[in-house]
Amino acid sequence: MNTLTEDLHYISERVNHLRAHFNSAQTRSYEWRVTQLSQLKKMLVEQEQSFLQALASDLAKSEYEAWTTEIGFTISDIDHTLKHLEKWMKPRKVSTPLIAHPAKSYQLPEPLGTVLIIGAWNYPIQLVLAPLVAAISAGNCAVMKPSELAPACSELLAKLLPKYLCNDSFWVLEGAVAETTEVLKQKFDHIMYTGGEGVAKIVMRAAAEHLTPVTLELGGKSPCIIDNDCNLDMTAARIVWNKWMNAGQTCVAPDYVIIEESQSQAFIDILKSKITQFYGNDIKHNQDYGRIINTRHLTRLVSYLAGQNIVIGGEHDTQKKYLEPTVVLDPDLDSQLMLDEIFGPILPIITVEKIADAISLINHRAKPLALYVYTKNTEFENYVLNFTSSGNVCINDGMMFMANPNLPFGGVGSSGMGQYHGQAGFDTFSHLKTVMKRSTLLDPALRYPPFTEIKLTLLKKLL
């Protein structure tokens, strides 16, 4: 055993402790789950200012944005879960075929065990705690690995969660590549990872060693289709809100816009006016506009702009990790800007001769996490829905589906696998155990040897 592995031995010890505690069955009761969820909510309410400060430190998030997308979002998720948890935990009855009568059949939700949650840096509180809400609701123990790229939030979670939650059931692991590599060597009953495709492949390879199921919440290039038949002013406002929240560092932000060439200049003009309306003329000093997570990502984003036709913005400040809202018109579809997920405040606009061409353009790329279409035309709306594939769709708005806990959230193809939020999260971290209970009052001889032609005839009628 090398020195590094010896130094990280505490990880396997702590995971084994959580597994042993889960096996004690203390996490299974409804009362335990309600207590832990209530304590999690209490932490968010009592420590709100600490979370706001950490989010401002890591991403320069405004109080409004931090509360809406991180703290308030998670509190709402907890409230919804507490309201419906008792119902979710009940056996789910299903019909029983005649051949099995007299009997009753049902699915019984049971916790998976000890799970691993690997969060992302762009929403460093929500993307750890929202999966945790689901894991708790299903009765699991959990290891949480916040992103080291958001150090203030990671440190705060590690400090506060042990003060509010059961320390035998939950553990926050801080660290970077070495710690993540070591924890992925451990056996878990489920792994949930939020982040990029490259690390997702590492997570899946590690999970395969233990045949561990995974939920992957990834991203991709989410398209935004603007039909001629739409309210262009409202469309621009909603796209600006959706795209430049968190300085574009949102997995469901529109990655590029597709619009007919005849509409493009009008859209650009309105887009520019909305950016000014929302963020003013001095965006660099506007506290409502966030910052890029680090200089490495800023350098990556700036490199995308080389040789591009920038029609709005483009200014950046490396020291302040600032890149203003930027719009690029008709980039080369083979450029890195159009090959990589942007994950920043750059919005390419792709013009087409007719909007129906958008379908082919989208379908020649990997399936996105989200797809947006702005139209008043129901026929075109259905055309888009029926001939494209994406994890989530929002019509005439951006990412508002995230506000509905009754809508499962997740990707498809390279944008992810599995879903959570609301009951979908409970089900993700549960095993729906199949149960059939048969009566002993009757025991027809139909299934028992010796087999006769009469028995076979009756069996064919019953099956």
Image (cartoon, rainbow, N blue to C red):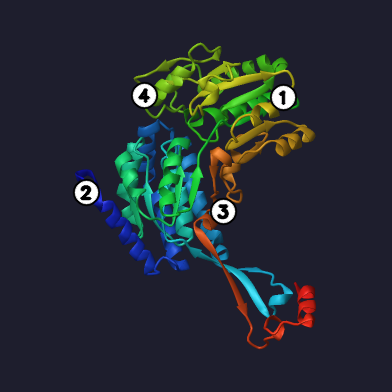
Mark drawn on residue 424: 3
- Indicate which disc, 1 or 2, sits on the residue closer to the N terminus: 2
Residue 45 shows up from this direction: no
Which residue is at a point 51% across and 21% down the rendered structure image?
A: 336
Q: Check whether the beta carbons of the residues at disc 1 and disc 2 lie within 8 A of each other.
A: no
Q: Report the residue that reaches farthest toward the bottom.
A: 441
Which residue is at a point 70% across and 16% down the rendered structure image?
A: 261
- Indicate which disc, 1 or 3, sits on the residue closer to the N terminus: 1
In this rendering, the answer to whether 215 lies above or below 37 is above
> For the residues marked 1 and 2, what is the alpha-carbon distance in whole angstroms?
58 Å
Q: Which residue is mark 1?
A: 357
> For the residues marked 3 and 4, what is the alpha-carbon distance in whole angstroms?
37 Å
Q: Nearer the viewer, mark 4 or mark 1?
A: 1
- Which amino acid type is shown beneath numbered disc 3? Ala
In this rendering, the answer to whether 148 lies above or below 190 is above
> For the residues marked 4 and 1, what is the alpha-carbon distance in whole angstroms?
37 Å
Dot 4: element: helix
- Which amino acid type is shown beneath numbered disc 4? Thr
Q: Which residue is mark 4?
A: 295
Label 2 crowd (10 A; few <14 / some 14-19 / many >=20)? few
Q: Check whether the beta carbons of the residues at disc 4 and disc 1 lie within 8 A of each other.
A: no
- Indicate which disc, 3 or 4, sits on the residue closer to the N terminus: 4
Dot 1: element: helix
Front-lying residue, 41 or 134: 134
> For the residues marked 1 and 3, what is the alpha-carbon distance in whole angstroms?
34 Å
Q: Position of residue 415 (x, y in %)?
A: 55, 38
Q: Classify residue 187 by image quadrant.
A: bottom left
Q: Position of residue 396 (x, y in %)?
A: 68, 34
> For the residues marked 3 and 2, what is the alpha-carbon distance in whole angstroms?
41 Å
Q: Which residue is mark 2?
A: 1
